[in-house]
Image (cartoon, rainbow, N blue to C red):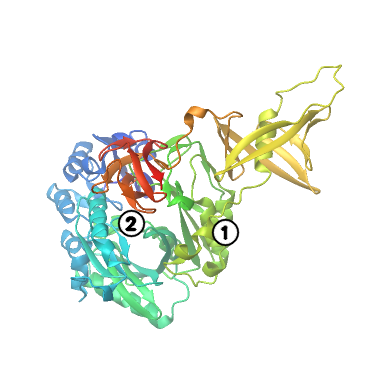
Amino acid sequence: MITSVLVANRGEIACRIFRTCGELGIRTVAVYSDADANALHTRVADAAVRLPGAAPSATYLDGDLIVKAAIASGADAVHPGYGFLSENADFARAVLDAGLVWIGPPPEAIEAMASKTRAKELMGLAPLGEVTEADLPVLVKAAAGGGGRGMRIVRRLQDLSAALESARSEAASAFGDGEVFVEPYVENGRHVEVQILADTHGTVWPLGTRDCSLQRRHQKVIEESPAPGLSEQLTDELLTLAVRAARAVDYVGAGTVEFLVAGDKAHFLEMNTRLQVEHPVTEAVFGIDLVAEQLRVAEGHALPDAPPHARGHAVEARLYAEDPAHDWAPQTGTLHRFAVPAGVRLDTGFTDGDEIGVHYDPMLAKLVAHAPTRAAALRKLAGALERSTIHGPLTNRDLLVRSLRHEEFTTARMDTGFYDRHLTDLTEPAPDPYAPLAAALADAHGRSRFGGFRNVPSQPQSKPYETAGEGIEVHYRHTRAGLEADGVRVVHAGAALVVLEVDGVRRNFEVARYGDEIHVNATRLTALPRFPDPTTQHAPGSLLAPMPGTVVRVADGLTEGTAVEAGQPLLWLEAMKMEHKITAPATGTLSALHVVPGQQVAVGSLLAVVQET
């Protein structure tokens, strides 16, 4: 019987596994890099072991270090979570060779399916060889790992070489394996998967379908179960294929078989030999704890002959610290306050005061809603996101709310091209027009007093802010009756709460300030100085780092004086396990290049300057 589990992972999934272990009375052990020294998963575990360093390759991807940590901490089992070494057969063998229980599939099954190229061969498929114009568009894909890393869509043959190089670099950094392959890219398909659970006694459960079509950078954003709108025949086919794939490799534990569905035809993509990020929607629909079942299977217990009956509908949204309107750029900083309403499930690796750094995936949390119907689940989750308190870096919260309410999604007509078609509309700034006024009134509260002999009305006061990339200036005045603003009745103005009445309707505005960062309900503002510092201005054509990170590549032959064209890739930054391309803003000449490969840069750092022709 398992008594102590080390989770070879971090953040949200480590906390989620620890929660189940705690409920079962199993001792928990965390591992952490130097960047995660104060992370939530290290605080909620019974014990924690340091992995010296910050880079994934030197910490969470070092299997020898993790096995040593398990032995040193007295753990008798290892759970890999997802990502990192979760689909690494050599790591699974190392755990078993050390005499520890491996809470996952046999190494042989991982080897057969973890490499997408070998998995396709097992299913009677093969990747493309030499790519021609007739094959386009194609998808370059990492053979190991997942999560959208190491994937590139190629629509022009001349872009293939650069896509292969970029995908190899990203895959090697994320998974320690730079192998990539090329396959046909199916336009406007739906990403549908089947959750499976298998024991060592020959029983395989297909736990329904999930739709994961809403994706950015080939990484899932919103997932739901069951997948809506599938015919009974297609659903049965998907479940049958998933069970066949599991039996083909004598699979044990939790896993996922993924398909691209176009019309009524299913195309096999891969089998993920691990727990998936989106497993909570399956848990909600089937009323089970997949981690608890993983632990039971690892202890040798048999599953019942049939899984529980499904009930209702569940939907999950991934909350990221990122800016969807600007190439999904990851955001960093302090998460000052984070709270969600009751009634939805929250899986997170962060709490109030935690720092969001540059080393790992920018996912803050997963919110999951379960209801009797799909429409009720979507409404419940959108409402919970809208009412959540998220004070800190910019997130994709507004995008999630709008996506869940988008007519194409609510009617289940979405596909993997959803954000390609709708991103501009979904990210159109729509800040609350009265939020800046509420912030100004809260800031002015109690700062001005009148003497007894003053009869002249005060001059209007002004306050500049930035919200959603736009500057705005609000005006108000102090009077004998208190604070006033044109067209708005100020019912109450306090440091943390402002009540305004507009056209006879009262609205409450909760205001929280952290330096120049201000949050008014769900609107994020930045207080601007009245007189900007001229020394912070940059020359036209300046390229600034959109996030802190590492310069991983500079375009071949790029030097000062090089002629460049608008949109031409100049250099690549790596932040939060993703590569971000920096392109020329206009056609002209590179007049300055301030960085070299390997250099760490802070957000706002001057990278290069392009002088427009």
Mark 2: few, some, or many residues within 10 Å (few <14, many ≥20)? some
283, 279: nearer the viewer: 279
Mark 1: few, some, or many residues within 10 Å (few <14, many ≥20)? some
Q: Is residue 375 left or right of residue 582?
A: right
Q: How many marks?
A: 2
Q: Position of residue 184 (x, y in %)?
A: 28, 72
Residue 115 against residue 549 in the figure, above or below: below
Q: Residue at x 15, y 53 (%)?
A: 90
Q: Which residue, as the protein is rendered here, is positioned at the far front?
A: 613
Q: Is residue 166 visible?
A: yes
Residue 118's disc is: none
Q: Position of residue 586 (x, y in %)?
A: 41, 50
Q: Position of residue 458 (x, y in %)?
A: 80, 26
Q: CA distance from mark 2 to mark 1?
A: 26 Å
Q: Residue at x 82, y 17 (%)?
A: 451
Q: Which residue is mark 1?
A: 380
Q: Secondary structure at mark 1?
A: helix
388, 58: nearer the viewer: 58
Q: Give, as a three-letter code, the residue at label 1.
A: Lys
Q: Give, as a three-letter code, the residue at label 2.
A: Gly
Q: Secondary structure at mark 2?
A: loop
Residue 147's disc is: 2
Q: Residue at x 36, y 68 (%)?
A: 193
Task: Tell me the quarter of the picture where residue 245 sits.
Answer: bottom left
Q: Is residue 387 left or right of residue 111?
A: right
Q: Is residue 499 left or right of residue 386?
A: right
